[in-house]
């Protein structure tokens, strides 16, 4: 079956991103397809490369980036939600004059529009929402 | 096609589970995960409510969330079924849609 | 359009205290551009989103309530509002903004978008969907 | 020294207000702000609860939050006092401590 | 130490579903280094933080419950736990972790840190504070 | 009177930061002193310089930065919470190898330890907590 996943909360503060990650991993291990993981609301904060979590805890962003790399996942961060919260790729950082090196999007994530969430709902057999 | 309702909030703090149960139709399933697993404990008003619903709506809890919170399986309402993440995935596939009660 | 999917946007939270109501509305606006069947559900504290007379000047926060009234122009014309939720909050439909649309299949007659439903009817609306988006 | 209790969550969604009212002592004050202002509306179970408490605990609501949510002052429970942000500041100064019920 | 302030840390949320319980504990640990009077209050879902037998391996999230048991060594010895909150959740004090401290004023005798109080007693503890920190 | 403020949620997602800002402004206008504003939990996200909020809405970070500048406010972002969420100053960015220009702390904010929150509670006459 083809799944899409919506992650609506940021890392650590709520369990939503952890639950979504475990669900996604289990679905892949069962041979299902993940059409897209869409990050909305504070969920966009999962896509920053700047976190430095404690050594004795999980690294939520790295978990997602590694899962994306291993399974060619499409991790999409909503552009409007990302602008409100300060998650930028290089194009956005340049366009808004945030300075060289300011882009903080993590490997494996890309920034795009809300249409990608609607498309995720249309294309997948099931959309599962993880939030607060 | 029946619905898989997903509830992740403690029923002692928020009204999400109560609202969900008020909208679940016969044949639907409810998965309690994250802080919602507390709702599956025996000996509480919520637990009694859950136990009373079992004839029409099937209740599941996510095992890893149950263990994390120190809820022993002996304390779960009878008839509540424990699933793991692969079981969570199966529940999504065997229902027509999932509905998250955030 | 026979393969169009039925999307339901579920609104259970009050506006302004958190951003979910506003960002849900932003999804509805984008989603309207896709050729899908769209309904909105307002229940629990979500019914507060449609309250008349919202004035956010004292907060310095953007008032987005007028946007609901514009949704008809985007083809979003079904606002299911749960009666039990209104009742519990001391509200009637008269306390909500008038929201209408022009029915192109009926000589562009102006019709109400708000449909007050019982909890049981809401449950049936919810089961009649392909995709349920809650924020 | 009395306490100023701060509640910002809707009483229809969370149990914070109920817990706060269960711990407020005579002479304490409760300020309802953000989504908690809905608790001050007449004609609801919560409004009745608020009205019944007025003899022992003084209830305030934050005006800018009331206006934002379209709650007209005529719909507020009688005896509930509307304050603005400077009034909020005064309430903090005139009580021994503030206690936020998050 | 006559000008020491009384700090109360109020815990009303369950662990793991959100980070507030863990980050509250991090404040308590840092706060213990200051010469202040410290008490912890556990009520509502906060009582779940003290539940026995927490095992987070299946979640891949750090289990921080053992830290509560170490707080006695930092001089944090008063855990007020509300009886009504336990009762509503089907819990008794036997379902909580044993948490103790060594009383340096009593020959380092091991004493329980958990003090079960009624709601009314909890209300009085709360009023007896200079600073109430809730997370 | 001397106040300290604790902000426990990030910008936009919850009203907490807006309420804290309005409260702080009103206290200053009444002639009170603000000993410190401490940002904890997701509150640290108020201190990113990378947000680009919609033109027709308020700019929460800029509001704080401008209020700090006008009144010499001490805006402190908790270092442990900031590391979990990806808010870094130049020293932190360098120390964790995040690359030139990656620091995203906004003007008027500084990163420091949790002891600053305890001190804020000790030194102020009243501590007011704004959260979710």
Image (tube, coloured by chain):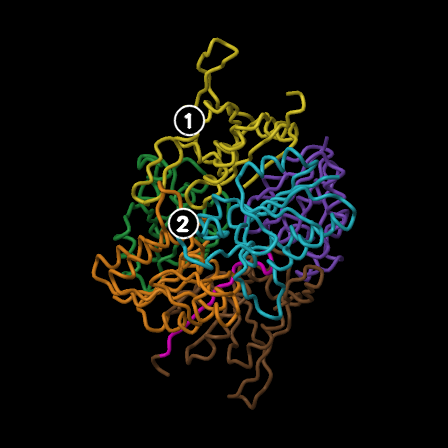
Chain colours: A cyan, B purple, C yellow, D green, E brown, F orange
Residue beneath disc 2 = A96
Q: Is residue D80 visible?
A: no
Q: Residue at x 39, y 48 (%)?
A: D53
Which chain does tag 1 point to?
Answer: C
Vertically, is D9 above or below C129? below
Q: Secondary structure at mark 2?
A: loop
Q: Residue at x 37, y 37 (%)?
A: C63
Residue E94 sits in quarter: bottom right
The answer to which of D70 and A43 lies nearer the viewer is A43
Q: Secondary structure at mark 1?
A: helix
* CA distance for labels 2 and 1: 32 Å
Q: Is residue D28 magenta?
A: no
Q: Name the side, left or right, on which F45 lies relative to E17.
A: left
Q: Is residue A103 visible?
A: yes
Q: Which mark is residue C69?
A: 1
Q: Which portion, as a residue range, is magenta? A: E4-17
């Amino acid at each position: 079956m083809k799944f899409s996943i919506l992650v609506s909360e940021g890392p650590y503060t709520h369990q939503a991103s952890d639950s979504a990650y475990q669900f996604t991993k289990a679905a892949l291990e069962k041979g299902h397809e993940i059409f897209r993981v869409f990050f909305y609301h504070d969920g966009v904060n999962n896509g920053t490369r700047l976190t430095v979590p404690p050594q004795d805890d999980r690294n939520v962003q790295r978990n997602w980036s590694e899962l994306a790399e291993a399974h060619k996942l499409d991790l999409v961060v909503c552009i409007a939600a990302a602008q409100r919260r300060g998650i930028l790729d290089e194009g956005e950082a340049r366009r808004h004059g945030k300075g060289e090196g300011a882009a903080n999007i993590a490997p494996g994530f890309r920034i795009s529009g809300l249409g990608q969430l609607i498309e995720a709902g249309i294309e997948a057999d099931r959309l599962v929402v993880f939030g607060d | 096609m029946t619905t898989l309702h997903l509830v992740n909030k403690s029923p002692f703090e928020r009204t999400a589970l109560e609202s969900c149960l008020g909208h679940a139709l016969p044949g639907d399933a409810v998965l309690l995960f994250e802080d919602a697993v507390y709702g599956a404990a025996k000996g509480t008003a919520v637990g009694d409510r859950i136990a009373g619903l079992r004839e029409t709506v099937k209740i599941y809890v996510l095992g890893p969330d149950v263990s994390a919170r120190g809820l022993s399986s002996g304390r779960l309402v009878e008839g509540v079924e424990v699933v793991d993440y692969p079981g969570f995935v199966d529940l999504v596939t065997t229902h027509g849609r999932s509905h998250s009660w955030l | 359009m026979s393969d169009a999917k039925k999307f339901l946007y579920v609104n259970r939270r009050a506006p302004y205290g958190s951003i979910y109501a506003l960002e849900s509305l932003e999804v509805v606006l984008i989603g309207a551009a896709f050729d899908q069947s769209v309904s909105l559900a307002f229940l629990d504290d979500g019914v507060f989103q449609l309250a008349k007379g919202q004035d956010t000047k004292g907060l310095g926060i953007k008032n987005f309530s007028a946007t609901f009234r514009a949704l008809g122009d985007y083809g979003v014309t079904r606002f299911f509002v749960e009666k039990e939720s209104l009742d519990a909050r001391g509200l009637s439909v008269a306390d909500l903004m008038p929201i209408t649309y022009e029915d192109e299949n009926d000589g562009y007659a102006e019709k109400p978008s708000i449909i007050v439903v019982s909890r049981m009817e809401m449950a049936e609306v919810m089961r009649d969907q392909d995709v349920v988006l809650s924020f």
